[in-house]
Image: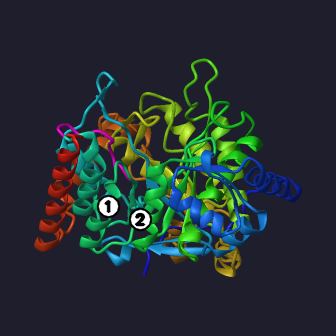
Amino acid sequence: MVARGYTRRCQPLRLLAAEQVEAIHRGTLHVLETAGARFDSKRALDLFRDAGCEVIEDEGRVRFPPGLVEACLEKCPSSFVVNGRDPRQDVRFGGNTVYFYNSVGMRTVDLETWEPRTPTLEEQNDGVRILDALENVHFVNSYTPYMEIEGVPHCMMLLQSLASRLRHTLKPTLLGYLRDSEVFAIEMAKAAGIRPLGMVAASPPLTFYPDACQAAFRFVEAGFPIWVSGGAVAGGTAPATVAGSTVSNNAELMAGIVLVQLIRPGTPVMVSDFVFPMNMRNGNPSFGALGCALHGAVFCQMWREYGVPAVESLSGYPSSKKMDIQSGYEKASIALPSALAGASLVSMHGGVHGELTYHPIQSVVDDDLAGLIGRLVESVEVSPDTLALDLITEVGPIPGTFIDRPHTRQWWRKEQFVPKVADRLTYPEWIEQGKKSALELARERVDEILSGHHVPPLSEDQDEEIEHILQTAREHYRDRGDM
């Protein structure tokens, strides 16, 4: 049994013609064969050399035979399952199912001043619990929901965040890495009885630093599926064009896939698109830009062709600093084409501005948007029952009505999408009930979740083991001088 998600029943969106797909693919193989990629890991370089790659030892550079790259792509399973604490919420990535997950923020945001502030551990835990309650959050990101927590040293952030997720959500999750934190994260995941994804991230352009290489070996050897990501800025660490940044980004992801498949052939892999165009006025990533929508849709189309599950990670990070109209249209305009083009997982919930701020109220609003997009990709059922020809004939012209018919009671909830916090009242009802906005309704829903949603706890033994691992990690980093 796995989480439902949304089945893409419409024809996939194709921005690229077949010859354009082929040009990008051949261009990617050309880059890997000529420029190659840098890996700061002797262990990885030895693997590549044994597999027939050209290795330039003093540069750490690897040039890949095209045949090896294509063979490693073929070794990636087209679908696989990740497990959380509740088997009913396991997720199968791949195929035609679309899932949604949360974005993250460095800090929370003050809703009066709209300025960032560091959240408390209680706010961290509450944020995770709210995500657990939202029906359109199917998977939980690493660093969820905050990258900073009051009183938690930076070296412990990933581990404290993981402990929060293990304790306050039943949903599957992603493990990151920082200063060997994956060693402890793997132990914690096994103690909780989950099978998460492990992240391996390229550093654009075309580089894998020692921590990424080490994480790849550790996560694969632990038996975890792998999330390969990049993070280029088009015009800075990748070409300014959508086609060129797709080639550069895909080359990085494929180099990571080759490493993973050489470590253990058949390891499940999914790839994440996190390429933003540069804001040429200030040099920052252009969150929420049209270029994100174009890049995401092209990326998802390409990886659908490869048969490797793809993550659209761009839409959860708008440029707006507030929960406003701009935030909504930026998220929707990026998420929708990627969901239509073939994404297995789409970023959505909670991001207020870029990777800087996050708020649970925003995640509640975004849950409506995720549900709306999910319903759209499920398309329209055309069958004798939905065509309703006999019913139309039976009802006939005015004064006939369909409102009292069993067919209407059977079908209206299936056909319509009913949001949880959007204002759908008539004007008189809206005035009578206090003229509440969607944000006010979302605030009320957050309060309802925190007062009424309870996540089954870990067993006492599991919780004690996780706390023991955290304490061991604290001592490790204290001994290293990181705390």
Q: Compare residues 452 and 243 and report the one nearer the observer.
A: 243
Residue 386: x and y in percent read 65, 74
Give the secondary structure at mark 2.
Answer: helix
Residue 74: x and y in percent read 69, 73
Q: Earlier in the sequence, mark 2 or mark 1?
A: 1
Q: What residue type is labelled 1?
A: Val
Q: Which residue is drawn at 68% across and 52% down?
A: 251
Q: Give the range drawn in magenta.
A: 142-151
Q: Compare residues 66 and 280 and report the one nearer the observer.
A: 66
Q: How far apart are marks 2 and 1 (CA)?
A: 7 Å
Image quadrant in which the C terminus is located: top left
Q: Can residue 237 be seen in this view?
A: yes
> Is residue 57 shown left or right of residue 243?
left
> Is residue 12 shown left or right of residue 171?
right
Give the total of numbered labels: 2
Give the secondary structure at mark 1.
Answer: helix
Q: Residue beneath label 1, please? A: 183
Q: Which residue is drawn at 69% across and 78% down?
A: 383
Q: Can residue 337 be seen in this view?
A: no
Q: Could you tell me if the residues under marks 2 and 1 are in contact, i.e. CB atoms within 8 Å?
A: yes
